Amino acid sequence: MSDSVGVAVVGCGYWGKNLVRNFAELGVLEALVDENKPAVLDLTAKYGGRALAFEEALVDPKVQAVAIAAPASMHHALAKRALEAGKHVFVEKPLSLEVADAKELCALAERFKLRLMVGHLLQYHPAFLELINLVRDGRLGRVQYLYSNRLNLGKVRREEDILWSFAPHDISMILSIIGSEPAEVLASGGYYLHDTIADVTTTHLVFPGGERAHVFVSWLHPFKDQKLVVVGSDAMVVFDDGEDWDRKLLFYPHKVEWRDRMPVVKKANAVPIAVSQDEPLKSECQHFIDCVLHERTPRTDGREGVRVLSVLARAAEALRRARAGEEPARARRHHPSRVEPSHPGVTIHESAYVDDNVEIGEGSKIWHFSHVLGEVTLGKNVNIGQNVMIGPRVTIGDNVKIQNNVSLYEGVTLEESVFCGPSCVFTNVKNPRSAIARKSEYLPTLVKRGASIGANATIVCGHTIGEYAFVAAGAVIAADVPAFAIFAGVPAKRVGWMSHAGVRLGPDLICPQTGRRYREVDVNQLEEIADDGFDHVH
């Protein structure tokens, strides 16, 4: 085991620049990855490190770990690529936007014996660490009730509820204190600035041991309030991050005694608990490095991230149910395209639009702000992420997954089990001009079964992506892609082969996960060597 580790920070914007600073101060910053080249150059001049493309960082032997601070919709795709490339991964919260995707990342990390850590920052705050010690030492007695406030004026988001933006830290702390997942999750919200995005939410958690908690979050609050209160049978404690260091953690030895069958409150003065004035982010970054160097499980590992994500997903579903019960007529009036009887067994979010003359297979899901135009056919169990536009006259097979911010124009066909990463781009005209109509010049694009397209990749029209091919994040496809080929770069070229299971093949062309064997027919053709003795050529 090496006594040092090189880290590439992926996403160097609003929050990522803080990771750059801390990893640089810890002496482990190796590379910076971001499309904003001027910002990267400014950061490298200040903190050091090299400006690399994501694919370059994945193959660089000096980079042993990546820290991802990209938009949440990209977390899963970027983390998956990094783990498959053999890199340890730190991901800012949330681990992903889907519980199944988060579980997949955990499985990859465990299979490759890599560290996977989620940036639940307050778990590394000195005041919270002391609070945990008070609970574990029995100073509070039996924990009975917890509540948290995370309130501020802004930063208002348009792509996600306040629940996903503000609540993960508090849910992470509460789950750590209780030590179990809630048996019941209830939630209610207020929608003031946007008809479908909650600006204020209250989430209630009921735990199997009888403990209860609530999480109140808002970006429409006149002042900043970040507070966690834990009430025990013998005492209470308040973690107030808005206070000065000497009063961030206050211990209240209040008690409630019973006299003549009546509860009597015995108040006591608050006792400040001394905490070290360490920067939580630096402690978090150091913890990640230590776990990589010494092969330890992070305090907020992938499994902890899954638990938090599971509660968030349950709360989001509770919000949806509560809103449907409160305003069903209003939702139908604002979203006339949402006609459930026309698509039995299909989930369509109330903010999504589905035009007439659309076929959707059972089990499919269409999420926030997406639009499916006329004469589109969607197969069974298709998952359409947020802000996706499809059509007209587009065909999508069964089990296709399309992540956020993707547009599929006329002429595009996706066969079964295709994966489209966040913000990947399809075209249907090679030389568009705003003032010139070129509908007669549309060129078809075919993506065959099982193929995967990475985040921000561009697929120039008129080409075919073969079965189980893998297009790397950010690649530009300007030629046909053979089956099983890995294409990366601008313009993209073949850099390897990928198995059916999505595992990069080594020189022996044997999938390490499934044992399936392949043979290279020529430089751009692979065939599977089947157990039946026949070669399956693609």
Image (spheres, rainbow, N blue to C red):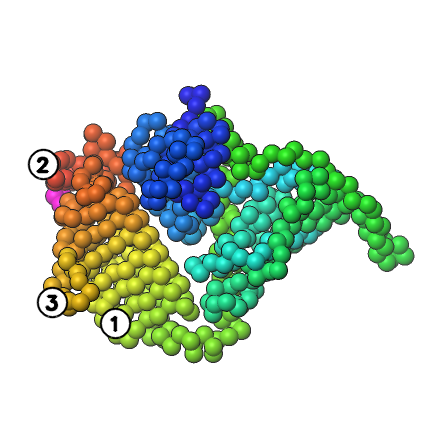
Towards the viewer: 261 or 330: 330
Res 215 seen here: no
Q: Does the magenta stretch include residue 450?
A: no
Q: Residue at x 42, y 76 (%)?
A: 334
Q: Residue at x 50, y 54 (%)?
A: 165
Look at mark 2 in the image and give the residue it sits on: 522
Look at mark 1 in the image and give the residue it sits on: 374
Tell me the kind of residue under disc 3.
Ser
Label 3 vs label 2, nearer the camera? 3
Tell me the kind of residue under disc 1.
Gly
Res 70 seen here: yes
Crowd band around label 1 with a 10 angstrom C-alpha radius: few (<14), some (14–19), many (20+):
some
User: Residue 273 appears at what percent x and percent y?
Assistant: 72, 38
Look at mark 3 in the image and give the residue it sits on: 440
Q: Is mark 3 on a helix, strand or loop?
A: helix
Mark 3 → mark 1, Cα distance in angstroms: 19 Å
Mark 3 → mark 2, Cα distance in angstroms: 37 Å
Report the number of numbered marks: 3
Q: What element carries label 2?
A: strand
Crowd band around label 3 with a 10 angstrom C-alpha radius: few (<14), some (14–19), many (20+):
few
Left or right of residue 256, residue 303 in this image: left
Mark 2 → mark 1, Cα distance in angstroms: 42 Å
Left or right of residue 231, residue 128 in this image: left
Pick the quarter of the image with the N terminus. Answer: top left
Region of the chain picked out in magenta, as a range: 534-538
